[in-house]
Image (cartoon, helix red, strand yellow):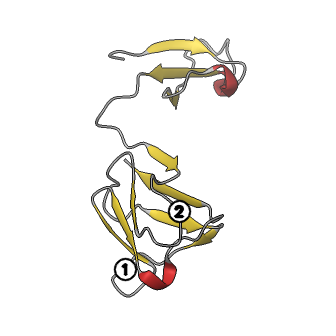
Amino acid sequence: MNDEKLINVPSANELADGDVLYVVQDPTGDVPLDRKVAVAPLRESMVRPVTEEPLGLIDGANLVFLLSGTPRQGSLNVFKNGLQQDISSLGDLTATGNVLTFNADAVPLPGDKLKAMYLK
C-alpha cells in the first residue's frame, strides 16, 4: 500500500478531514473487519464533494455569484431557500466554470439563502 498506513479505528469521528477509508481484510482474524481500515491521503486527482455558499451580494439586483472551485461536468446542484434551482439557459440560472448567473426572474432577494453542492 503506497502512501497508506494500516490503523484500527474505533470511530470514523477520529479520522482527519480528507482521509479516505478502504475496508481491508485482516489476515490474522484478530481485528474485526469493520474496525480495520487503510487510510490513504487525499490526492489532488481524487473527486471531492463540495458544499458552499456562492459568493456574491444578495440584494435583488445582483445576478452573478462565484464558486470557490470549478464543478465537474454535470455535478452541480444549486439551492435557493432549500429549493433546487434549474440550471439551464431557460431555467433559473446558468453555470460556466465557477460562475453562476441567475436569470432576472430568479434573482436572489435579500434574506434568500444560497447553497451550491458539486464534485470538484
- Closer to the chain start, of discs 1 and 2, is 2
Measuring from the top left, give residue 94's x and y in whole percent: 35, 73
Quadrant assignment, res 2: top left
Measuring from the top left, give residue 66's x and y in whole percent: 38, 55
Mark 1–mark 2 contact, CB under 8 Å?
no
What amino acid type should be assigned to the residue bearing mark 2?
Ile
Rendered view: 49 above or below 78: above
Measuring from the top left, give residue 26's x and y in whole percent: 57, 18
Q: Residue at x 35, y 54 (%)?
A: 71
What amino acid type should be assigned to the residue bearing mark 1?
Ser
Drawn side of residue 33 relative to residue 37, left or right: right
Q: Which circle marks residue 104 in the picture?
A: none
Q: Quadrant of the N terminus?
A: top left
* Nearer the observer, 114 or 83: 114
Q: Residue at x 41, y 16 (%)?
A: 4
Measuring from the top left, give residue 117's x and y in whole percent: 50, 56
* Nearer the observer, 46 or 96: 96
Drawn side of residue 116 relative to residue 9, left or right: left
For label 2, the SS is: loop
Label 2: how many Cα within 10 Å (few below 14, some 14–19, many 20+): some
Rendered view: 74 above or below 120: below
Reading the image, the residue beneath label 1 is 88
Q: Residue at x 37, y 43 (%)?
A: 47
Reading the image, the residue beneath label 2 is 58
